[in-house]
Image: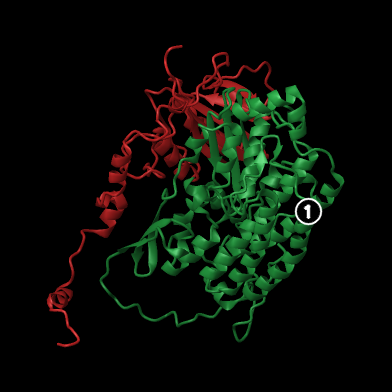
Amino acid sequence: MAVKKSSFDSVAAGPAPSADAPDASRPATASTPAHPSVDALRGRFADAVLHHEVVGGDEHVVFVTPERSLEVLTFLKDDPGQRYDLLRDVTAVDYGGGRPLQVVYQLFSLTFRRALRMKCELPLNALEIDSAFWLWRSANWLEREVFDLFGITFRNHPDLRRILMPEDYAEGHPLRKDFPLRGRFSRAEQTRRALSQELGHYYIQQEIDMGGEPQSLPPSMKELEARPEETAAG
Amino acid sequence: MAQKTVEFTLGRNPEMGVDGRPVMGPLAPIDLPEPDFASENMLLNIGPQHPATHGVLRLVVELDGETIVRCIPHIGYLHSSFEKLGEYRTWNQVVPLTDRMDYLAPLIYNCAYAMSVEKMMGIEVTERCKLTRVIMMELDRIFGHLLWLGTFAMDAGAFTPFLYTFEEREKIYRLHEAYTGARITTSATRVGGMMSDMPEGWARGVRDFCNGLPRTLDECVTLLNANGILLSRTLGIGAISGEDALNFGFTGANLRGSGVAYDVRKDQPYYDYETYDFQIPIGEHGDCYDRYLVRMEEMRQSLLILHQALDRLEKAGGPMDVPDPRISLPSKTDCMSDMESMIHHFKLITEGIHAPPGESYFPVEASKGELGMYVVSDGGNKPVRWRVRPPSFVNLSVLPKLMEGHLLADLIMINASIDIVLGEIDR
């Protein structure tokens, strides 16, 4: 090998799957134990349920087509046999290499003390899925975070804005594998943007509307301000 | 719950209402005619450095007079993208990132991370390691709650409990330091075990702390439980029903304050929590005062667990780490005398652990609520994705709902009562 390799090459390239590793987004499972909710889903949404697997010993994962995710979630929340009343988490996984992004819902049913993980795979050219906000309010900020860090759009989310990164962040979506660890812009450009004094950098449009036009001082105050400063001698 | 009945000492005739709450007379005549001012709503910015916001939280509120019409929280001032950084580190190198999240209860985060990786890899840790982690997690639950108690009381105007609780916290700081060498950034766990066995006499130190804490708690209860100022600032303030709390994703003491008995230690037990004898305190009204009572009782329940775990630890001998050369480092003696061990040591230090492909979501009851560590591996020595389900993040998203229609002064109290830590919200 004549090419001189820098030790930073591997850092810049990011984590890569080893050559002989099987596709980790679909670990092969021989026989999966039954899960009552998955059985119910298979009966009701036969064409929407793609795949069912058990990971980490006892954690059930069900893959659902993204088009019907909202229907499935509604069923899981409202059906008296399911009652998943706590949406623990919404997140996404990017395996890199052009593979689809997975949106992951962690559900828990207090009634039956049962956990279920639902995944929807979104191809990179169609990163859109229905919002779960209208079922669980806890999806509000969690989906905003996924939107911010992965760039997945949640349809019908009432307030889909960036949450952790600044509102006017222009470098992309940091948790995607194609995003370099140090960001896309140079350090100088990043600093310049961070120090910008734009009003929109500090207030969102909603707040600017709320506050109205930046007001000038009332006339009485203007008079006071125009007066020359009183000194101890004068 | 145990602490439900409160004695009311402020009013001239302390009467109890039908709901078991002391009846409070109005502090000022309430039927004064409202002067009719033509007014428009006002925009007020609080933070990001205001001391009562508990970190770099920024709240923009729309006010009608003194009443909050709308509250918009802005977060992200501490964002350092720990999850992205974790993808560039080996499995054990992620541990130091975890305790920088909730720096008020770092050991819970260390333990939760190690537990999730172990679950994904199918490692069963030793009995001694389990007990040590249970002790650490319960110790840090008290650690986090004590800070909350001090700041909560201070936001209500009481300064003394802050000094009392920080004195107790100092004892836990010393226990951290004795075990890990650091007071806050503990990084105590490794995949498959702990950084080391506990030092001589550490368990005795924990026991001494457990014996001393109830006295301090009693003193705080005397100062606060029936304190007129605290009662008038917390009773009925920031109330949320159990159904709403669950739907909005409240977990931990906030959810239990609304009367939903959901605790991961009971509902999805890990580390033999089902064999410990302890109770889950729940509130009824879901207001600031009930959240306060729930946390006070939780500390006492944690003490119960600590005593039981310390008893079991005395009987549990054996090694701390999993005796597997692919996961745990060999001892120094083996390393210097045995070729095999030296190779294992070299591989573990240079490459790190190789986790088989798989994933795991491990929920743990942290001091702020349900903490979930979601790790995904593709067979390499680094995580493909490491996700933290942050309890404070979801709890904070309920804040605008809790604020609706309350006064501006209540904002401080409500914010104090939901117990957030910005390090973990922003990550």
Compared with B263, B113 (above or below) is above
Identify the residue at horizontal 72%, vertical 56% (top origin): B302
Q: Amino acid type of disc 1?
A: Ala
- Chain letter for green, please: B
- What percent of the width, then of the height, locates residue B229? 55, 76
Quadrant where the C terminus of chain A lies?
A: bottom left
SS state under label 1: helix
Residue A128 in sight: yes
Q: Quadrant of residue B257?
A: bottom right
Q: Which residue is at a point 70% across and 34% down the rendered structure image?
A: B192
- Which residue is more in the foreground, B17 or A58? A58
Viewed as shown, does residue B283 lie left or right of A118?
A: right
Q: In the image, residue B90 lies at what x, y percent?
A: 57, 31
User: What hue represents chain A?
Assistant: red
Instruction: Tell me: A66 left or right of B186.
Output: left
Q: Foreground residue, B314 or A204?
A: B314
In front here: B98 or A170? B98
**Looking at the rendering, which quadrant does residue B346 occupy?**
top right
Q: Where does residue A198 sit, x and y in percent of width and height?
A: 24, 50
Let me know if residue B282 appears in the view: no
- Residue, far top: A1
Q: Residues within 10 Å of mark 1 (few under 14, many from 20)?
A: some
Q: Is residue A175 above or below residue B27?
A: above
**Residue occupying the point 57% across, 42% down:** B96
**Which residue lies under the disc numbered 1?**
B203
